[in-house]
Amino acid sequence: MKLRIERVSKQYGRGPWALREFSLELAPGVLGLLGPNGAGKTTLMSILATITRATEGRVLWNESEAARNPDELRSVLGYLPQDFGVYPNLNAVEFLEYLAAVKGLDAAASRKRIDELLNLVNLADVCKRPLGGYSGGMKQRVGIAQALLNDPKLLIVDEPTAGLDPEERVRFRNLLSELSGERIVILSTHIVSDVEATATEIAMISQGRLVAHASPEELLQRVEGRVWEWVLPSAELNAARQKHLISNTTRRSDGVHARVLGENPPNGAHPVAPTLEDAYLYCLSQHRTAVVAA
Amino acid sequence: MSASRVLYQMARADFLERVRRYSFLLTLAFAIYLGYATFAGHILLRLDDYRGIYNSAWLGGLMALVSSMFLSLVGFYIVKNSIQRDQDTRVGRILATTPMTKTFYTMAKTASNFAVLASMVAVMAGATVVMQFIQAEDRHIDLWALLGPLILLSLPCMAFTAALAVLFETLPLLRSGMGNVIYFFLWSFLLVGPVSVVEKNRPIPPSAYLMDFGGIVSTMGQMQSAVRQLDADYKGGSSLTVGNHEPAPPKRFVWQGIAWNQPILLGRVVWISFSLLLVLIAAVFFHRFDPAREWRLRKATAAPSAAEESATTVEHGSRAEPATIHLTPMAQARPRYSLAALVMAELRIMLKGKRWWWYAVAGGLSIACLASPLENARGGVLVAAWIWPILVWSSMGARERRNETESLIFSSARALPRQLPAVWIAGVVVALLTGGGVGIRLLLRGDFAGAEAFLAGAFFVPSLALALGVWSGSSKPFEAIYTAWWYVGPAHHTPGIDFMGVSAASSEPVVFAMAAVALVAVAYWGRRVRMGYA
């Protein structure tokens, strides 16, 4: 089972490139796709989900090119888009039955699966109510259930925790971890903690380009010895921001505790263990510096 | 910021948002086409054997009539989405948190609607000037004679149309497709109503001017009077025909233009006042993007309250802990791609959510098709039976875009060759369920030509809905076009456009069967383009 993305680029009309020469090869596991807003994550997800074609490059599912034979990929695909709607007059069961029919699933098998999925996403109690009355978080859970309907080998989830409350978010992260064994899961988000909890690999994207692709441990190693904690008076914080890359600040009685990223620590700063958020911000800043220099 | 400035900014933002969409270019193209069609003689105003020479007065009057009649119909459907757009873009919720009053909002929306319609009138005014030069029957441009009718007759008509569109959007029943259907009949009444007050060869009563929504009485009435003074044998006939293939009227006369009398001007003030009144009424019903009111208006089960949601959370207190997953593996079950299952699912989506009386009437019409005398069933009951599900058909092809389920459906295997045909078949099933009794009885009687016509209709209607829905992404074009076509064609047994074949004389099954095939192909092509990745 392998998904290969080869030098994929996407341009909408004659506008700027949303994605540029993006290459990646994936095996079973959870890939966390991290990037700021507008980085090209959703464009990449749409290409992988066969919603839109790449302008250049190709996507291969088990060596079969998705553009030539999209149904081979679609038949094993579970996709939770960033924005999607529901039919307001149907209830959750009817909606999932409809999508099961669209996906060509056997009626009897899918019925059992729908019951299980509704339990899994905590909607069994309200599954007979029209979807039009669901809250945003509940609709998102219906979206999660539909993505898992066909027991997908490739599961693509785009900003899946948007609208979920903290408990549901944790629950969904756990679900992703458990599902990842025999399938490829691509989790696109800008929330680092979602990726931290589940991803076996991380890809960082910025301005449509792949900035980094590594395991979480490797990414953390990259910033080892480059994260510092610096205590400074709050009045000096703005000036400090001009000079240093600060990933986080906490106000305490002795002043502001700032996490500073960089090769050279400010005077009085001491080294601390890096987090994935530090690694993410450091990689992005390195990329931006390189782009400006180029 | 002053109130007028706020109003201006609100209307301006809404107007700019519209005119920067490609659909606005289509709107202007339609206005240009109307000008061209009039110039080319496809739209012809005649007074029995007479027409006016193409001077400023005649062309101004003619264009005022054409713009009032067509733009008040098509324009209504074009602008009846301003509140919906704020809803869809969620801008409405931001506006609702500002000090903006409801009256202010409905007034701004009406102003924006009016600006869109007025821009179409302006395009037609430009076309009129060009037309007068090209026709070259009288090249003297009299600006007031040319533009006066457009300003004084068409613009108040557009103002009323703009305000009515806002009112329709604020009223729950009229906001939906039902409103689109109802408007067609209201429009017919508004246009024809004042004409019925006028008696042939008698002076026009002031009340006719006051009721003159589209300016028909003011223009055609005065044109008739002018011809009557020229020709004692003139019978008082007049017509504005579309798609005219008859030879042009042999006689010409010089029309000096509308004599702007007090009743006409008072009538225009009345229609502008009505527009303002509609704005105020709309403000009363405007929901100000309150989700509770919006939801209640959608007539569905109440949304779960926060308390209910938190109850679900409490009930599953340990849900944040790792979920124990017991999911039936589906990998072994090969996809079956059953078309029948998909058709049933599509049918369920189409028919779900209607009120009980909708099913009762549909059932009644279906039984009436079976039980009433065949001639009545074919000529009358079937006509009713196939207008009743208009809102069911109108969602075909557009539902996926409207409900934002495209990404879920289009990423499924074989979506194009399965889901679209399933929608079409479900639409045909609806036609057969509602009017099938007529088809069965025609077959039993051995009237195969009649049965063919019936079947062609049953295929044609959903095909038209599907093609329009796929290409427009909206149910509105089908609702507007089908209502007008149904009224002019089958309801009046008009040969050539009677797609139901309500009588042997008017039926043309081969034409409509072929049209159905072409429309399905157009829909398929449109969906393929939309998917971009078939």
Image (cartoon, coloured by chain):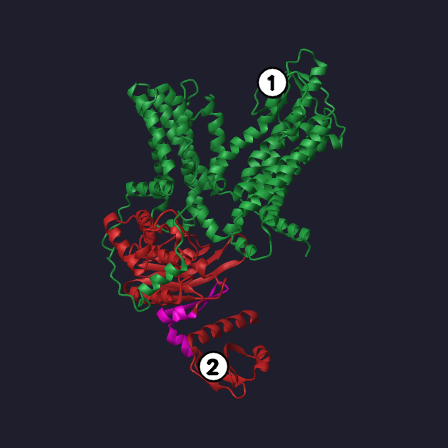
Chain colours: A red, B green
Magenta-span inclusion, residue A199: yes
The N terminus of chain A lies in quadrant: bottom left
Residue B361, horizontal then vertical, whole percent: 37, 32
**Dot 2 alpha-carbon crowd within 10 angstroms: few under 14, some 14 to 19, many 20 or more:** many
Magenta-span inclusion, residue B322: no
A275 left or right, relative to B67:
left
- Secondary structure under badge 2? loop
Residue A124, horizontal then vertical, whole percent: 30, 56
Q: Residue at coordinates 34% horizontally, 56% vertically from top-left?
A: A147
Along the viewing direction, whichever of A105 and B369 lies nearer the viewer? B369
Along the viewing direction, whichever of B236 and A25 lies nearer the viewer? B236
Q: Amino acid at mark 1?
A: Pro
Residue B483, horizontal then vertical, whole percent: 48, 31
Would you say the residues marked 1 and 2 are in contact, meaning their CB atoms lie under 8 Å apart?
Answer: no
* Chain on which label 1 sits: B
Q: CA distance from mark 1 to mark 2?
A: 89 Å
Q: Residue at coordinates 38% horizontally, 40% vertically from top-left?
A: B355
* Chain on which label 2 sits: A
* Residue B146: mark in rendering: none
Q: Residue at coordinates 52% horizontally, 31% vertically from top-left?
A: B185
Residue B408, horizontal then vertical, whole percent: 38, 51
- Disc 1 designates what residue? B247
Q: Amino acid at mark 2?
A: Arg
Which residues are the magenta region?
Answer: A192-221
- Secondary structure under badge 1? loop
- Disc 2 designates what residue? A226
